[in-house]
Amino acid sequence: MEIGIDSFGGVLSDTATGLKLSPVQRTQNLLEEIALADKVGLDVFGVGEHHRSEFVDSAPVVILAAAATRTQKIRLTSAVTVLSAADPVRVFQEFATLDLISKGRAEIVAGRGSFVEAFPLFGFDLDDYDSLFAEKLDLLLKIRENTRVFWNGKYRAPLTGQAVYPRPLQDPLPIWVGVGGTPASFVRAGTLGLPLAVAIIGGEPKRFRPLIDLYREAGRRAGHSTEKLTVGLHVIGFLGNTTEQAADDFYPGYAHTFTEIGKERGWPPATRAQFDALRGPTGALFIGDAETVARKVRYVNQALGGSSRITFQMGVSALPHDKMLRSIEILGTEVAPKVHKELRSDHLTNAARLVLA
């Protein structure tokens, strides 16, 4: 299992002091976080895409390219690219360039986004939310497969054999599909044989098992091998020296963020009781010390029938930079080794059972 981090580059107010980081400082902090994640051996770092005042990630591939020059091994991905509101030709060109800069470490997670500002900003109709994504994903995959592209669609001028350059170092350039809870999105990813990135931000992760099974079944029916049907998980998580410290540090900013989002979406304000329930053994929040979080990773992996990647979104809470860096350090040096050791043990145990059977 690969273990990593996703960030939305939030410029969030510190709920304790009322101070707000400047966009310059937040961007520099984000680059330092990616460099540390690479140093402590994490596998992947993703940067989201938002077009709102509280984020600095409207051009994630630029941030990732800067990070590529500061890192050696960590894979660099979007989390997610809002493909519905983008030109697939430019998306491919940008990530192919990132792949060259990083010497083969770029990935795209294509999604429709959890906010809608990109649609009017780039001149698209929100009523076309799903059809835009389906058409543009089709074009992105065509570009990945062919240097010269012949394609025709509804929302973009046709391509009549034009060549798309540069070509990436990786062949093929990895493209994941980012999904929330819509069954049709799971089926689409499975039918196309694309790896799946599932966002789990609330409730109990086990509720996604039927949807992941639906993805795997759709993939099998389309003739794709089990090995090709890869599942990754995007979760909210934060590490501290103790579980109590991690929870107390993370909660104020978490409550502020989700209460503000709730005002837009009709959700009730976040409460400490709700937060504590979600960070319990079967809840969606991965918050605690190394042992607590490693135990939850193992539980969720089993509950969902296995996954190949888990990325922790730590930036939904305003936290001092030193505490964010400490959380990344714990994830890389303590949680990841524990998880890998436990999963190897589980694999050997299951293999022994099969032999005895």
Image (cartoon, rainbow, N blue to C red):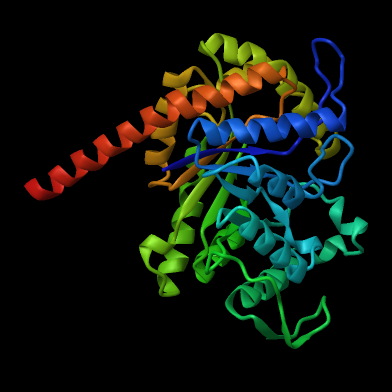
Q: How many marks?
A: 0
Q: Residue at x 44, y 55 (%)?
A: 213
The spot of residue 205 in percent (x, y) is 51, 38
Q: In which quadrant of the rendered view does residue 67 lie? A: top right
Q: Residue at x 80, y 15 (%)?
A: 15
| 144 horizontally vs 91: left or right | left
| 106 horizontally vs 57: left or right | left
Q: Residue at x 42, y 63 (%)?
A: 228
Q: Residue at x 41, y 75 (%)?
A: 223
Q: Residue furthest left?
A: 356
In the rendered image of this protein, does residue 330 appear above or below residue 207? above
The spot of residue 93 in percent (x, y) is 72, 66
In the rendered image of this protein, does residue 159 appear above or below residue 338? below
Q: Nearer the viewer, residue 134 or 33?
A: 33
Task: Examine the rendering and report whether any part of residue 202 can be seen.
Answer: no
The spot of residue 298 in percent (x, y) is 39, 33
Q: Nearer the viewer, residue 41 or 49?
A: 41
Q: Nearer the viewer, residue 51 or 25?
A: 25
Q: Residue furthest bottom?
A: 160
The spot of residue 326 in percent (x, y) is 58, 19
Task: Examine the rendering and report whether any part of residue 302 can be seen.
Answer: yes
Q: Quadrant of the N terminus?
A: top left
In the rendered image of this protein, does residue 300 appear above or below residue 51? above
